[in-house]
Image (cartoon, grey):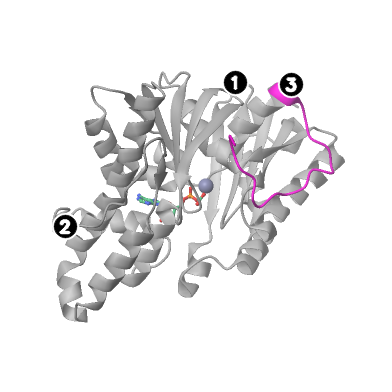
Amino acid sequence: MNDQFFILGIETSCDDTGASVLNEKGKIISNVLSQQNVFHAKYGGIVPEIAGRKHLELLPYVVDCALKEANLNLKDISLLTVTHGPGLVSSLLVGVDFTKALSFALRIPFVGVNHLEGHLLSPLIENRGLDFPYLGVIISGGHTEFVIVYKKGEYEKVGGTLDDACGEAIDKFGKLIGIDYPAGAKIEELSKSGKSDTFKFPIPKIKKGEFYVSFSGIKTYVSNLIKGFSEKDLDLIKADLAASFQEALFNQIILVVEKIIKDYNIDKIAIGGGVAANERLRLMLKEKFSDKAEVFSPSKILCTDNAGMIGYAGLLKFKRTGGDDLSLPVNSHLSIGS
Ligand code: KG4
Ligand code: ZN
């Protein structure tokens, strides 16, 4: 029996089943993830019913792996943390009900965590000198949000997307050029052999004082462009097209970030979410803001969905507000900072 304070984090908001163990300082000891890509790829996107069923099968095993890797067992855990929104209801329910059952049976507290808060605070986990206030840029498959983090627990959403999330636009583009879901990392790889200035994409006009991106124009444009190529020609220009498309999305994000840090007088930018794993985006941000702001990017494992960030955000929430009770609902539309 261990008398230290350990946290078990659980993440099942979408299609990845995750479990983590952290110590009382928020240091991640284990962070295990089982991805379901192979089960969803042939449908071209996530099938909620399949995701929920797979979580049910995988979660006990993934939790076991996280505990084993940390050299602990359930009796050593003092706090349970679980994503309770936003996400797919059938996926969220598996993690939340599993956690509630553990909490009840083991008589240990649990907290429900906002998945977006997990992404927003993930750049703090590795202690790379990031302090407050900072502009958190969440860029994932389900979200594109610009949030000012004044301190832990105090957030102001200042902008976002008017239509698709950045990762969603990338995944849809992937489908058009024959790349399986999730397409982000494969498009990043393909782009390395392409020229990003080959194709020019429309840039939407943003009104003064508004901090929004919109990817629908770029999406329609690229879809029409692709229709004009034969399959053979498309193969020849795929890398250039991918590099140009990726660059156009990232340029929009950079444009909005630039406006926000100027208007809000912020000198720290921290990115999170699956798209934040992209090396090209990281470089573009660093180059663009080298003299205006410091850019913080978490390790790649902490960018894409993972339970480490849920354990971390959950521990901080528990310190602020204490545990939740068994009536805590899942909330597929949970928002942040607004
Ligand atoms: O944060 P995440 O794992 O799940 C959500 O909360 O949505 O993000 C998944 C998204 C997918 O759209 C995926 O294509 C994208 O992140 N992604 C990337 C990269 N790795 C994952 N996009 C661009 N470059 C990457 N290296
Ligand atoms: Zn996410």
Q: Give the magenta range.
A: 320-338
Quarter of the image with the N terminus in it = top right
Query: Left or right of 108: which side holds 71?
Result: left
Q: Is residue 15 above or below residue 268?
A: below
Amino acid type, callout 2:
Gly
Q: Residue at x 51, y 68 (%)?
A: 40
Task: Check disc 2: other Cα within 10 Å, few if <14, some if 14-19, many if 20+.
Answer: some
Residue at label 3? 3
Identify the residue under disc 1: 25
Q: CA distance from mark 2 to mark 1?
A: 44 Å
Q: Which mark is residue 61?
A: none
Residue 330: image x %, image y %? 73, 49
Q: Is residue 1 above or below residue 160?
A: above
Q: Where in the figure is residue 104, as x and y percent of width and height? A: 86, 41
Q: Nearer the viewer, mark 1 or mark 3?
A: 1
Q: Looking at the rendering, in which quadrant would you find the C terminus?
A: top right
The amino acid on which the numbered mark 1 sits, given as a three-letter code, is Lys
Residue 129: say if magenta: no
Amino acid type, label 3:
Asp
- Nearest the eye: 105 or 243: 243
Q: Nearer the viewer, mark 3 or mark 2?
A: 2
Q: Secondary structure at mark 3?
A: loop
For the residues carrying marks 2 and 1, which lies nearer the camera in this image? 2
Corner quadrant of residue 88: bottom right
Q: Secondary structure at mark 1?
A: loop
Q: Position of residue 304 (x, y in %)?
A: 46, 46
Q: Which residue is found at the position 48% from the left and 19% from the top?
A: 132
Q: Residue at x 62, y 68 (%)?
A: 50
Assess whether residue 337 is covered by the magenta stretch.
Answer: yes
- State which tag comes first along the sequence, 2 or 1: 1
